[in-house]
Amino acid sequence: MEQVFAVLPCNGMDKSAGCVAREIALQFVEKGCHLICPVLCGASSARYSKIAEAYPLLVIDGCTMRCASKLAAKKGLKTIKRINVADFARAEDFSLNPSLRLGETELDFACKIVRSFEKND
């Protein structure tokens, strides 16, 4: 990965798309990006504001509720790139498993989204 981002993922633990968003964020972190915890960011953590100012912000939304995007907007964070798992699944005609545990298929799908993002970056 050429560019390092601050990554603000969905925290949708009650939806499979949120679990995939979390996995995508973890894959970016393993490539050297900086994770912004949405829960602590929402609680006014100055640490995360500094990270978001220092690096371009990638927001990863799980579903059409766009909670991570809304949090970034509420905090006044400038989003450079966005990923929406539900939109990507729809475009790829991929059915997300309703299980909150990611299986091999969902993990492969998360990898596919990351690769797609890197190609378009």
Image (cartoon, rainbow, N blue to C red):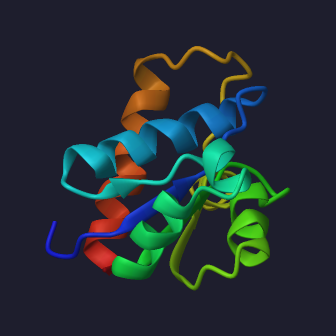
Which residue in the rendered view is the most extreme toward the right? Answer: 65
Can residue 5 be seen from the camera position used here?
Answer: yes
Q: Residue furthest front?
A: 46
For residue 61, side relative to residue 60 (left or right): right
- Judge by depth and name the residue closer to the eye, 94 or 14: 14
- Tally of numbered discs: 0
| Quarter location, residue 41 | bottom right
Q: Residue at x 71, y 28 (%)?
A: 13
The residue lying toward the viewer, choosing from 23 and 51, is: 51
Residue 93 appears in the picture as rendered: no
The reply, left or right, for residue 2 in relation to residue 30 is left
Question: Which quadrant, please, contains the N terminus?
Answer: bottom left
Indicate whether 5 appears above or below 15: below
Nearest to the observer: residue 114 or residue 32: 32
Pinpoint residue 5: horizontal percent, then vertical percent: 34, 69
Residue 112 coordinates in the image, percent (x, y)? 36, 49
Q: Which residue of the protein is positioned furthest toward the left in this rendering?
A: 2
Q: Please name whichever residue, 90 or 103, is drawn nearer the observer in this view of the structure.
A: 103
Please provide percent x and percent y for residue 59: 56, 65
Quadrant of the image occupied by residue 4: bottom left
Kindly indicate the quadrant of the structure image that contains residue 44: bottom right
Q: Residue at 48% x, 16% y: name it.
A: 103
Vertical order, 40 against 66 (above or below): above
Residue at image coords 59%, 56% = 45
Against 110, residue 70 (above or below) is below
Quarter of the image that includes the C terminus: bottom left
